[in-house]
Amino acid sequence: MVKVILGKDAGLVKERVLEDISKNIGELNEFNFLSLDMYSSFIQEGVAFAEAASFLADRKAVLLTSCYFLSSDMDKANKAFDSKQDYKAFINYLKSPNPECDIYLIGSGKLASERGNEFIKTVKKYCDITVDEGLRNDELAQMGLRYVGRKNKEITLEAMTELVNRCPQDWVMIKNNLDKLMCVEGQIQIEDVKELVSPKLEDSVFSVISSLFKNNIGEALKNYKDLRKRGVEPYYLLSIFSSQFRFFYEVYSLTRFSNMTELEASKELGCSPFRVKYAKRDMADLDNIKLLKIMKDLHVLENNAKFKGDNIDLLFELFIVNFRKKYLAKPKQR
C-alpha cells in the first residue's frame, strides 16, 4: 500500500501514521522502518528501502514527511536539491510495489495539479489519497490526556483544555509543552499551564485591545511590551490590530445598519456567535465613525513608520496612551 495524506497539522498526521504503522508491524527498528524528511533526503532512498528484501522483518514501512512535491501550497526545495530527487524511480515503484512494504507520504495544503506533471498523475492513479481535516480541540485534549497517561503522569482536564487553547491546531507544540509540564511534581494543574506556557499570540494581542476598552492603559502597555520582548514584530501586531478593528466595524454595520441578530452576523462573517457578542460588548462606546477613524489612524501610523522613518514602537505606545482620550471620551456638553 502507498498512501498520501495531506493535513493541516503535519505533526498530528505524523503521530497518527506512526500509531498505524506500529499496529501493523509492531515495534519499530532499523530493519522494518525508515523515516525521511523530504527537505533533507531523497525519495529514491525510500524506494530503495521499500524494494530491498528483509530477512529480519515480515513487514516494513517507509514514512516520507514534508513532501513538498505533492503540494501546491508548501514551500519548494531549492532547484539544485530538487533536481536530485529521482521521481522516476518512485513512479516505476508505484507500478510494481513491494506488497510487504507500506509507504506513507505526508504533506500539507492542496494536492498539486496533474497538468503536465507525470509524478502527480501517477500518484493519483496508484495511491490512496486522503485529506486529514485535523481534530477538534476536545479531541486534541483527549489525545493529550492519553499521551500523559502513557508517561504515567496526571493532568486535569481543565489544564489540558487550557493548553490546547494556547497551542491551536498544533500537536507538536502541544506535545512539546506536555513534555515540559510533566517535569512538574504531582498532577499538572491549570496554574502550571498558565505559568509555563505562553498564551497564543492572538489572545495576547486581543488582551491589549481589551485593556484599551477597559481604560486600563498601564495593562495595555505592559501587554504590548511583553509581546515585543517575545520577539513579535510590530508590523505583525499592526496587521492584527487593524484586522480586529475591521472586524468590529463589520459587526457594527451588520448589527446596527442591517439589523442582523448575533447569530445571523456570525454566519455572515464565518465566526462564532460568541465572538460577535464579545465584539459588541467591547465596542459599546464606539460607533462606525470612531471605528473608521481608528482604522485610518493605524494606516497613518504604518505609513509614518515605513516612509518617514518614525519609530514604530513609539508610535504604537502613543496610540495606546491616547486611545481613551481620542476614541472613547464623550464630547463635553456646552
Image (cartoon, rainbow, N blue to C red):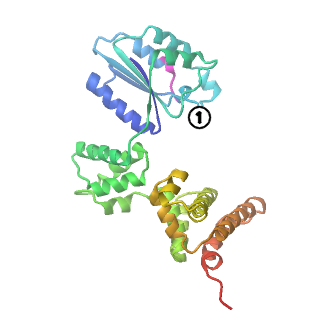
Residue 292's place in the image compared with 137, above or below, is below
Q: Residue furthest right?
A: 308
Determine which quarter of the picture holds residue 59: top left
Say which quadrant the N terminus sits in.
Answer: top left
Q: Quadrant of residue 171?
A: top left
Instruction: Tell me the element at label 1.
Output: loop
Provide the residue designation for mark 1: 75
Residue 137: x and y in percent read: 37, 48
Magenta region, mostly helix, strand or loop? loop
Residue at the spot x=50%, y=34% of the render? Answer: 108
Q: For the magenta stretch, what is the residue range?
A: 40-44
Residue 79 percent across, percent down from the top left: 64, 26
Left or right: where 81 falls relative to 34: right
Instruction: Report whether 127 appears left or right of 240.
Output: left
> Badge 1: how crowded within 10 Å, few (<14), some, or many (20+)?
few
Q: Residue at x 51, y 51 (%)?
A: 267
Depth check: give the residue in front, 241 or 53: 241
Instruction: Identify which residue, 121 or 258, lies in the foreground.
Output: 258
Query: Residue 272 location, x and y as percent?
Result: 46, 54
Q: Give the farthest residue toward the front.
A: 259
- Magenta stretch encompasses residue 320: no
Left or right side of 107 for 192:
left
| Residue 53 visible in rendering | yes
